[in-house]
């Protein structure tokens, strides 16, 4: 699902909707969709997130590994970052609401649905968009 989501983020139709917007990827794992959003769009910022600190460390490694692939690496590095957040703990969430939320294959058990709903409602701006692939 993350590869399909990444291709979707890379498409002109979706990447153009992110221009100047703040984007967060939830439950990112290695962060492929978030990387694609940062690389192919002109998003103001892209935050790749996961609950597991080791997974976030790996996502940051993937950001660093791919930073030289952008036409202007400085711009790429300034717009994308990785962080640990807990959907059930609002103190770990970004302080500001975001324009776009990206998520792929984040529901693997029914008990996660209320937490995902809570974090989406809590983080997205009223006019924001939610992109989900499963």
Image (cartoon, grey):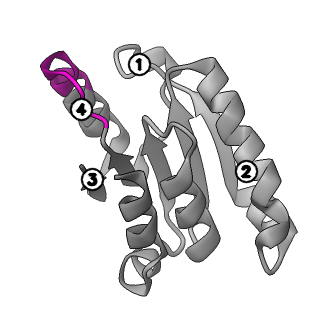
Decide whether residue 86 is among the magenta residues. no
Q: Which residues are magenta?
A: 106-115
Q: First in sequence: mark 2 or mark 1?
A: 2
Number of marks in picture: 4
- Identify the secondary structure beneath mark 3: strand
Identify the residue shown where x is 46% and y is 63%: 6
Any mark on residue 132, and which? 3
User: Residue 22's x, y, as percent?
Assistant: 51, 57
Q: Which residue corresponds to mark 4?
A: 107
Any mark on residue 63, and which? 2
67 versus 8 height, above or below: above
> In the image as oriented, which residue stretches furthest toward the left?
110
Q: First in sequence: mark 1 or mark 3?
A: 1
2 vs 1, front mark: 2
User: Residue 80's x, y, as percent?
Assistant: 67, 53
Identify the residue shown where x is 68% and y is 45%: 81
- Identify the secondary structure beneath mark 1: helix
Confirm or deny contact between disc 4 and disc 1 (CB under 8 A). Answer: no
Q: Nearer the viewer, residue 70 or 74?
A: 70
Identify the residue shown where x is 45% and y is 81%: 16
């Amino acid at each position: 699902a993350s590869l399909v989501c990444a291709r979707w983020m890379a498409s002109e139709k979706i990447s153009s909707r992110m221009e100047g917007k703040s984007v967060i990827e939830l439950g990112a794992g290695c962060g492929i969709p978030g990387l694609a959003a940062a690389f192919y769009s002109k998003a103001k910022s892209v935050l790749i997130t996961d609950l597991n600190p080791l997974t976030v460390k790996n996502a940051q490694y993937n950001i660093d590994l791919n930073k030289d692939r952008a036409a202007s690496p400085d711009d790429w590095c300034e717009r994308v970052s990785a962080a640990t957040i807990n959907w059930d703990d609002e103190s770990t969430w970004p302080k500001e609401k975001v324009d776009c939320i990206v998520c792929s294959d984040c529901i693997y058990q029914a008990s996660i649905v209320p937490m995902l709903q809570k974090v989406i409602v809590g983080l997205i701006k009223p006019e924001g968009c939610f992109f989900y692939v499963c």
